[in-house]
Image: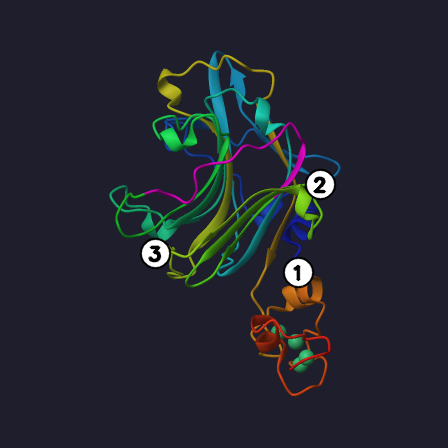
Amino acid sequence: MYVFNGNVCIRKNHFLGGPVIDKGGERVGPGDNYFSHSTNNVWVDTNGYLHLKIDQRNGTYYAAEIISQQSFGHGRYRFFVDGRIDNYDENIVAGLFTYDTEFLDPDSSTNEIDIEFTKAFTSNTNLAGKNAVFGSKPEVPSNYFHLHNSGYTLPANALTLHSFTWFTDKIDFKSQKTHDLWPAQSNLIAEFNYPGPHIPPISQGTEQVRLNLWIFQALNTTLVNTQNLELVFRDFHFTPLDDYDGDGLFDEDETWIYITDPNDSDTDGDGCNDGDEVNSETQPLGGKC
Ligand SMILES: [Ca+2]
Ligand SMILES: [Ca+2]
Ligand SMILES: [Ca+2]
Ligand SMILES: [Ca+2]
Protein backbone atom coordinates (compact mmCIF):
# COMPACT_ATOMS: atom_id res chain seq x y z
CA MET A 1 0.00 0.00 0.00
CA TYR A 2 2.14 2.90 1.19
CA VAL A 3 5.74 3.32 0.30
CA PHE A 4 7.18 5.39 3.11
CA ASN A 5 10.19 6.67 1.27
CA GLY A 6 10.72 9.36 3.81
CA ASN A 7 10.93 6.99 6.75
CA VAL A 8 13.23 4.54 5.03
CA CYS A 9 15.57 7.10 3.58
CA ILE A 10 15.77 9.59 6.41
CA ARG A 11 17.89 7.16 8.38
CA LYS A 12 20.45 7.45 5.65
CA ASN A 13 20.11 11.20 5.92
CA HIS A 14 18.82 11.30 2.39
CA PHE A 15 15.21 12.38 2.41
CA LEU A 16 13.44 11.01 -0.68
CA GLY A 17 16.44 8.73 -1.19
CA GLY A 18 18.24 11.21 -3.34
CA PRO A 19 21.22 13.49 -3.46
CA VAL A 20 21.05 17.17 -2.70
CA ILE A 21 21.49 19.20 -5.82
CA ASP A 22 24.56 21.31 -6.33
CA LYS A 23 23.94 23.25 -9.49
CA GLY A 24 27.57 24.09 -10.01
CA GLY A 25 28.08 27.46 -8.35
CA GLU A 26 26.57 29.46 -11.18
CA ARG A 27 23.26 31.24 -11.33
CA VAL A 28 20.78 28.80 -12.84
CA GLY A 29 17.07 28.19 -13.08
CA PRO A 30 14.69 28.49 -11.60
CA GLY A 31 14.97 32.22 -11.05
CA ASP A 32 18.72 32.68 -11.76
CA ASN A 33 19.60 31.53 -8.27
CA TYR A 34 22.76 30.16 -6.76
CA PHE A 35 21.82 26.71 -5.45
CA SER A 36 23.93 25.22 -2.69
CA HIS A 37 24.10 21.79 -1.09
CA SER A 38 25.55 23.28 2.09
CA THR A 39 23.97 22.09 5.33
CA ASN A 40 23.05 25.75 5.78
CA ASN A 41 20.59 25.17 2.94
CA VAL A 42 19.49 21.54 3.19
CA TRP A 43 19.53 19.26 6.22
CA VAL A 44 17.55 16.57 8.00
CA ASP A 45 16.99 17.15 11.72
CA THR A 46 16.85 14.62 14.56
CA ASN A 47 13.11 14.17 13.99
CA GLY A 48 13.82 13.11 10.42
CA TYR A 49 12.32 16.30 8.98
CA LEU A 50 13.80 17.78 5.82
CA HIS A 51 14.69 21.48 5.99
CA LEU A 52 15.15 23.67 2.92
CA LYS A 53 16.44 27.16 3.61
CA ILE A 54 17.45 30.22 1.62
CA ASP A 55 20.65 31.31 3.33
CA GLN A 56 22.65 34.52 2.92
CA ARG A 57 26.42 34.20 3.09
CA ASN A 58 28.85 37.04 2.33
CA GLY A 59 26.05 39.11 0.87
CA THR A 60 24.84 36.37 -1.49
CA TYR A 61 21.64 34.38 -1.21
CA TYR A 62 21.83 30.63 -1.78
CA ALA A 63 18.71 28.66 -2.67
CA ALA A 64 17.96 24.99 -1.96
CA GLU A 65 16.74 22.07 -4.03
CA ILE A 66 16.57 18.32 -3.52
CA ILE A 67 15.82 15.58 -6.03
CA SER A 68 14.56 12.06 -5.49
CA GLN A 69 16.66 9.15 -6.60
CA GLN A 70 13.58 7.15 -7.52
CA SER A 71 11.23 7.72 -10.41
CA PHE A 72 7.73 7.05 -9.15
CA GLY A 73 5.40 7.42 -12.14
CA HIS A 74 1.62 7.42 -11.95
CA GLY A 75 0.25 7.55 -8.44
CA ARG A 76 -0.53 9.76 -5.46
CA TYR A 77 2.19 12.10 -4.20
CA ARG A 78 1.76 13.55 -0.70
CA PHE A 79 3.93 16.28 0.81
CA PHE A 80 3.67 16.87 4.56
CA VAL A 81 4.65 20.54 5.04
CA ASP A 82 5.51 22.32 8.27
CA GLY A 83 5.95 26.03 7.61
CA ARG A 84 4.25 29.39 7.64
CA ILE A 85 4.07 29.86 3.89
CA ASP A 86 1.62 32.71 4.37
CA ASN A 87 4.33 34.99 5.81
CA TYR A 88 7.06 34.46 3.21
CA ASP A 89 8.63 37.41 1.47
CA GLU A 90 6.67 38.09 -1.71
CA ASN A 91 9.59 36.98 -3.90
CA ILE A 92 10.13 33.55 -2.35
CA VAL A 93 8.96 30.52 -4.33
CA ALA A 94 8.63 26.97 -3.01
CA GLY A 95 8.13 24.11 -5.47
CA LEU A 96 6.81 20.58 -4.89
CA PHE A 97 6.91 18.87 -8.27
CA THR A 98 7.89 16.14 -10.67
CA TYR A 99 10.53 16.98 -13.25
CA ASP A 100 11.72 14.94 -16.19
CA THR A 101 15.44 15.05 -16.84
CA GLU A 102 14.91 13.58 -20.28
CA PHE A 103 13.78 17.04 -21.28
CA LEU A 104 16.68 19.15 -20.02
CA ASP A 105 17.01 20.86 -23.40
CA PRO A 106 16.22 24.50 -22.53
CA ASP A 107 14.09 24.77 -25.65
CA SER A 108 11.97 21.89 -24.51
CA SER A 109 9.66 21.64 -21.56
CA THR A 110 10.23 19.42 -18.61
CA ASN A 111 6.94 17.59 -18.16
CA GLU A 112 6.33 18.96 -14.70
CA ILE A 113 3.45 18.56 -12.32
CA ASP A 114 3.68 21.38 -9.81
CA ILE A 115 2.36 22.74 -6.57
CA GLU A 116 3.98 26.12 -6.06
CA PHE A 117 3.82 28.45 -3.07
CA THR A 118 4.51 32.07 -3.93
CA LYS A 119 3.12 35.58 -4.13
CA ALA A 120 5.53 36.43 -6.96
CA PHE A 121 3.58 35.40 -10.04
CA THR A 122 1.95 38.80 -10.30
CA SER A 123 2.13 38.84 -14.10
CA ASN A 124 -0.81 36.47 -13.94
CA THR A 125 -3.65 38.59 -12.63
CA ASN A 126 -5.59 35.47 -11.64
CA LEU A 127 -2.98 34.88 -8.96
CA ALA A 128 -3.03 38.37 -7.43
CA GLY A 129 -3.32 38.19 -3.67
CA LYS A 130 -2.89 34.40 -3.63
CA ASN A 131 0.10 32.45 -2.33
CA ALA A 132 -0.27 29.03 -3.97
CA VAL A 133 -1.16 27.46 -7.29
CA PHE A 134 -1.50 24.06 -8.95
CA GLY A 135 -0.04 23.56 -12.42
CA SER A 136 1.77 21.44 -14.95
CA LYS A 137 4.21 21.98 -17.75
CA PRO A 138 3.69 19.51 -20.56
CA GLU A 139 6.04 18.51 -23.31
CA VAL A 140 3.75 20.05 -25.87
CA PRO A 141 3.31 22.93 -26.38
CA SER A 142 6.92 23.64 -25.55
CA ASN A 143 7.64 25.83 -22.55
CA TYR A 144 3.97 26.21 -21.80
CA PHE A 145 3.22 26.35 -18.11
CA HIS A 146 -0.41 25.62 -17.55
CA LEU A 147 -1.82 27.02 -14.33
CA HIS A 148 -4.68 24.76 -13.45
CA ASN A 149 -6.64 26.98 -11.17
CA SER A 150 -6.78 30.63 -10.20
CA GLY A 151 -4.50 30.12 -7.27
CA TYR A 152 -5.50 29.78 -3.67
CA THR A 153 -4.43 31.06 -0.29
CA LEU A 154 -2.70 29.02 2.36
CA PRO A 155 -3.77 30.22 5.81
CA ALA A 156 -1.67 31.17 8.85
CA ASN A 157 -1.33 27.53 9.68
CA ALA A 158 1.94 25.62 10.04
CA LEU A 159 0.89 22.05 9.25
CA THR A 160 -0.47 21.53 5.75
CA LEU A 161 -0.63 18.51 3.45
CA HIS A 162 -0.44 18.85 -0.33
CA SER A 163 -0.97 16.15 -2.90
CA PHE A 164 -1.40 15.43 -6.56
CA THR A 165 -2.54 12.18 -8.06
CA TRP A 166 -1.13 11.61 -11.53
CA PHE A 167 -3.21 9.50 -13.89
CA THR A 168 -2.79 8.91 -17.62
CA ASP A 169 -5.68 11.23 -18.42
CA LYS A 170 -6.09 13.55 -15.42
CA ILE A 171 -4.39 15.07 -12.39
CA ASP A 172 -6.17 15.54 -9.06
CA PHE A 173 -4.65 18.24 -6.83
CA LYS A 174 -5.43 18.91 -3.19
CA SER A 175 -4.18 21.11 -0.34
CA GLN A 176 -5.46 20.82 3.21
CA LYS A 177 -4.82 21.77 6.80
CA THR A 178 -3.54 19.06 9.18
CA HIS A 179 -1.51 15.99 8.27
CA ASP A 180 -4.49 13.60 8.45
CA LEU A 181 -4.48 11.36 5.39
CA TRP A 182 -8.25 11.63 5.14
CA PRO A 183 -9.15 14.97 6.72
CA ALA A 184 -12.51 16.42 7.59
CA GLN A 185 -13.99 18.47 4.75
CA SER A 186 -13.58 21.59 6.90
CA ASN A 187 -9.80 21.22 6.64
CA LEU A 188 -9.75 21.29 2.85
CA ILE A 189 -7.99 24.42 1.55
CA ALA A 190 -8.14 23.87 -2.21
CA GLU A 191 -8.91 21.07 -4.61
CA PHE A 192 -8.72 20.89 -8.38
CA ASN A 193 -9.42 17.95 -10.65
CA TYR A 194 -7.67 18.70 -13.91
CA PRO A 195 -9.02 16.73 -16.90
CA GLY A 196 -6.23 17.65 -19.32
CA PRO A 197 -5.14 18.10 -22.00
CA HIS A 198 -1.75 19.10 -20.58
CA ILE A 199 -0.96 15.89 -18.70
CA PRO A 200 2.73 14.96 -18.65
CA PRO A 201 3.23 11.47 -20.07
CA ILE A 202 5.36 8.79 -18.48
CA SER A 203 8.35 9.02 -20.77
CA GLN A 204 11.28 6.77 -19.95
CA GLY A 205 10.76 6.56 -16.21
CA THR A 206 13.11 9.51 -15.92
CA GLU A 207 10.88 11.92 -14.03
CA GLN A 208 11.74 12.46 -10.37
CA VAL A 209 10.36 14.41 -7.44
CA ARG A 210 11.97 17.74 -6.67
CA LEU A 211 11.50 20.10 -3.75
CA ASN A 212 12.96 23.57 -3.87
CA LEU A 213 12.96 26.98 -2.23
CA TRP A 214 14.28 29.90 -4.28
CA ILE A 215 14.04 33.60 -5.11
CA PHE A 216 11.97 34.88 -8.01
CA GLN A 217 14.22 36.76 -10.49
CA ALA A 218 17.04 36.56 -7.96
CA LEU A 219 19.43 38.70 -10.00
CA ASN A 220 17.30 41.79 -9.45
CA THR A 221 15.61 40.97 -6.18
CA THR A 222 16.37 41.94 -2.61
CA LEU A 223 14.34 40.12 -0.02
CA VAL A 224 12.50 42.56 2.24
CA ASN A 225 11.07 40.10 4.73
CA THR A 226 13.87 37.78 5.87
CA GLN A 227 12.12 36.48 9.00
CA ASN A 228 11.06 33.21 7.39
CA LEU A 229 13.37 31.73 4.76
CA GLU A 230 12.70 28.08 5.51
CA LEU A 231 10.41 25.26 4.49
CA VAL A 232 10.18 21.99 6.41
CA PHE A 233 8.87 18.68 5.10
CA ARG A 234 7.93 16.22 7.80
CA ASP A 235 7.38 13.42 5.31
CA PHE A 236 6.71 12.39 1.76
CA HIS A 237 4.50 9.49 0.66
CA PHE A 238 4.06 7.96 -2.74
CA THR A 239 1.19 5.55 -3.25
CA PRO A 240 0.93 3.62 -6.52
CA LEU A 241 -2.49 3.31 -8.14
CA ASP A 242 -3.00 -0.35 -7.37
CA ASP A 243 -6.34 -2.08 -7.93
CA TYR A 244 -5.61 -5.56 -6.61
CA ASP A 245 -9.13 -6.99 -7.07
CA GLY A 246 -9.71 -5.28 -10.42
CA ASP A 247 -13.02 -3.68 -9.47
CA GLY A 248 -12.04 -0.20 -10.70
CA LEU A 249 -11.40 1.24 -7.22
CA PHE A 250 -7.86 1.81 -5.99
CA ASP A 251 -6.76 -0.17 -2.93
CA GLU A 252 -6.16 2.97 -0.92
CA ASP A 253 -9.56 4.46 -1.79
CA GLU A 254 -11.32 1.20 -0.93
CA THR A 255 -9.68 1.14 2.49
CA TRP A 256 -10.14 4.78 3.40
CA ILE A 257 -12.98 6.27 1.36
CA TYR A 258 -15.42 3.51 0.41
CA ILE A 259 -14.63 1.12 3.29
CA THR A 260 -14.92 -1.76 0.83
CA ASP A 261 -12.54 -4.72 0.70
CA PRO A 262 -9.52 -4.06 -1.57
CA ASN A 263 -9.07 -7.82 -1.91
CA ASP A 264 -12.68 -8.59 -2.91
CA SER A 265 -14.27 -7.13 -6.04
CA ASP A 266 -17.78 -7.66 -4.61
CA THR A 267 -17.54 -6.85 -0.92
CA ASP A 268 -21.21 -7.42 -0.10
CA GLY A 269 -21.53 -10.49 -2.32
CA ASP A 270 -24.63 -9.30 -4.17
CA GLY A 271 -23.24 -9.97 -7.65
CA CYS A 272 -22.38 -6.34 -8.54
CA ASN A 273 -18.77 -5.28 -8.21
CA ASP A 274 -17.63 -2.52 -5.87
CA GLY A 275 -16.58 -0.07 -8.59
CA ASP A 276 -19.90 -0.41 -10.43
CA GLU A 277 -21.81 0.08 -7.19
CA VAL A 278 -19.86 3.23 -6.30
CA ASN A 279 -20.35 4.65 -9.79
CA SER A 280 -24.05 3.83 -9.96
CA GLU A 281 -24.55 5.03 -6.38
CA THR A 282 -26.06 1.75 -5.27
CA GLN A 283 -24.58 0.40 -2.08
CA PRO A 284 -21.31 -1.56 -2.21
CA LEU A 285 -21.74 -2.51 1.45
CA GLY A 286 -25.24 -3.95 1.12
CA GLY A 287 -28.66 -2.82 -0.06
CA LYS A 288 -29.31 -2.46 -3.74
CA CYS A 289 -27.27 -3.89 -6.57
CA1 LIG B 1 -10.08 -2.45 -6.00
CA1 LIG C 1 -13.10 -4.21 -3.73
CA1 LIG D 1 -21.60 -5.70 -4.50
CA1 LIG E 1 -24.83 -3.70 -3.03
Q: Is residue 17 magenta?
A: no
- Report how far apart the C-alphas of labels 3 and 1 lie in the structure: 29 Å
Looking at the rendered structure, the secondary structure element under dot 3 is loop
Earlier sequence position, callout 3 versus callout 2 = 2
Taking the image as drawn, is residue 264 in sight?
no
Which range is magenta? 145-161
- Report how far apart the C-alphas of labels 1 and 2 lie in the structure: 18 Å
Q: Nearer the viewer, mark 3 or mark 2?
A: 3
The residue depicted at 50 percent of the width and 12 percent of the height is 224
For residue 232, above or below residue 173: above
Taking the image as drawn, is residue 66 in sight?
yes
Q: In this view, does 124 lie to the left or right of 241?
A: left
Which amino acid, mark 3? Answer: Pro
In which image quadrant can residue 159 be found? Answer: top right
**Where is residue 164 shown, x and y percent of the image?**
53, 51
Which residue is under mark 1? 2
Q: Which mark is residue 48?
A: 2
Which residue is under mark 3? 197
**Where is residue 96 shown, x and y percent of the image?**
51, 41
Q: Which of 188 and 81 is in front in this view?
A: 188
Which quarter of the figure is the C terminus placed in? Answer: bottom right
* Mark 3, other Cα within 10 Å: few <14 / some 14–19 / many ≥20: few
Q: Nearer the viewer, residue 62 or 200?
A: 200
Q: Nearer the viewer, residue 138 or 54?
A: 138
Looking at the rendered structure, the secondary structure element under dot 2 is loop
Which quarter of the figure is the N terminus placed in? Answer: bottom right
In which image quadrant can residue 239 be found? Answer: bottom right
